[in-house]
Amino acid sequence: LSQIIRRNPNEPPLVFHWFPLIGSTITYGMDPPRFFKENREKYGDCFTFILLGKKTTVYLGTQGNDFILNGKIRDVNAEEIYTVLTTPVFGKDVVYDCPNAKLMEQKKFMKIALTTEAFRTYVPIISDEVTTYFKRSTDFKGKSGIVDIPPKMAEITIFTASHALQGKEIRDKFDESLAALYHDLDMGFSPINFSLHWAPLPWNNRRDHAQRTVAKIYMDTIKSRRGREDEAGSQDIMWHLMNSEYKNGVKVPDHEIAHMMIALLMAGQHSSSSTSSWIMVRLASRPDIMEELYQEQVKALGADLPPLTYEDLAKLPLNQAIVKETLRLHAPIHSIMRAVKSPMPVPGTKYVIPTNHVLLAAPGVSASDPQYFPQPDLWEPHRWEKDHPLTPTIVRNEQEEEEKIDYGYGLVSKGAGSPYIPFGAGRHRCIGEQFANVQLQTIVAEIVRLFKFRNVDGSNDVIGTDYASLFSRPLEPAKIYWERREAN
Ligand code: HEM
């Protein structure tokens, strides 16, 4: 009752809860998408809940996504929320440990390195990493077997990303010390660190030691690469950053390059590895689609299946749709948060979001809204074809010009109005979208060439989602049955 009486009429409705500090932390944390959907039915698109003692206002739907993600810099702020988690992991002076204008310049440097020319060199590197991985892995010996797939996809993701984005020298270090060090860094990303990031807990000490050691490895590599003639024309991001300059004429310092390298690998690792795990889990639940993918390659590229090229990826629409549809239902980032810096009136309502609130966008909700996606809970890659009965309305309206804006790192789609924005929108939008697509499509195409998957029990069931870390992923063990194609 007190929650109803004390309510400010200009604030969105508050989700009912029993305990003041805990609020809805547990129900939200266990299954965020369900929490959003249930409360949307009760309170509408805009409502507030208590998350670890903090008033957190959710604004769902395309208008909510736009309100939060395209919010003005004087109104919303990302670094205030994320810095406690990311700075100990990435290091100083990059991403959220610097003014937003500097992040925009850093994103520009990283984005410029991700060109078509670079992608052309990445596809063979990724293909090679995948085939070598399956040749060497003891879990894939013989003709068939059962494997818990997410840890395997995590390894494939880090090997392919580090090799393509950071060069062979760094990639080779993942066979030695780097893998364990990144594992320690990863512990800094557990949600408990939102409140205990500063504490002298054992895993925080290991995180800090790992950060220093990894940064030193990168800095030593940078020093040894400088001035080497055989490096001219390199296409990896480290090399590009080594040759970049801020607008004020200052060259990017070595420690910032090192910290950006960590940030890039961490940003991409969790989202790409979760997505590739979901793809494998989904393919095991639909062996017919896995077979279609194989036939698509045979038809488009020839029965001898020549080495994959960047250009080949565009000839494989189903292979592309697999990534797209998986990101629709399994976007790894379920909640995007911003601190409110000045009172924000919500257009068309009487609500004003005060500065003691945090805003939360959940683009996954609009991506599974039946208003746009017929039978939204069905994983159906064919829905991305133009004339399929389940084609989303956003594909049908493709002719409409997308609104684009430049925040300092090139033109980006505002994403306003689109219910499908797994890579975010606005000034914090992902710069890794194209890389992730190239990486994921190449990994899928190579795996389809090698294997047939199915569920261990032969069913079409799909495992549930683990929301316990900041990036959602399949619950483990997520076991699948594999069989080598060449065995037939
Ligand atoms: C930002 C998703 C892969 C680098 C974002 C955001 C989303 C996202 C939703 C916006 C976060 C926010 O607004 O707070 C994804 C997904 C990926 C993926 C779904 C893969 C399937 C990658 C990769 C890289 C990367 C591979 C690096 C090569 C970044 C960076 C940002 C970002 C640097 C900017 C952060 C900011 O400006 O605040 N990503 N990402 N991402 N992502 Fe990705």
Image (cartoon, grey):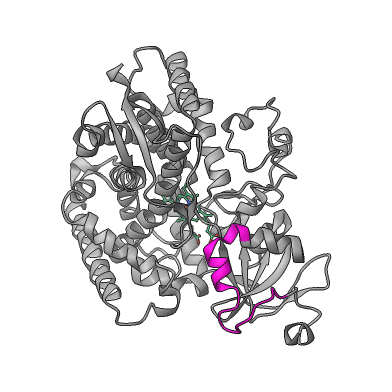
Q: Residue furthest top?
A: 303
Q: Is residue 426 above or below residue 97?
A: above
Drawn side of residue 357 relative to residue 91, left or right: right
Closer-to-camera residue (80/5): 5
Task: Name the residue located 81 percent from the left edge and 80 percent from the top edge.
Answer: 9
- Quadrant for the N terminus, please: bottom right
Drawn side of residue 53 relative to residue 67, left or right: left
Closer-to-camera residue (402/56): 56
Q: Residue furthest front?
A: 457
Q: Is residue 295 above or below residue 472?
A: above
Q: Is residue 36 above or below residue 84?
A: above
Q: Position of residue 193 (x, y in %)?
A: 40, 74
Residue 253 visible somewhere in the drawing: no
Q: Which residues make up the magenta segment?
A: 14-34
Closer-to-camera residue (424/202): 202
Q: Position of residue 354 (x, y in %)?
A: 70, 79
- Quadrant for the C terminus, please: top left
In magenta stretch: residue 95: no
Residue 162 visible somewhere in the drawing: yes
Task: Name the residue located 63 percent from the left edge and 32 percent from the top edge.
Answer: 383
Q: Position of residue 365 (x, y in %)?
A: 64, 53
Quadrant of res 197: bottom left
Drawn side of residue 464 relative to residue 197, left or right: right
Tally of numbered tags: 0
Task: Name the residue located 45 percent from the left edge and 52 percent from the top edge.
Answer: 473
Quadrant of res 370: top right
Q: Is residue 284 above or below residue 368?
A: above
Q: Position of residue 2 (x, y in %)?
A: 74, 87
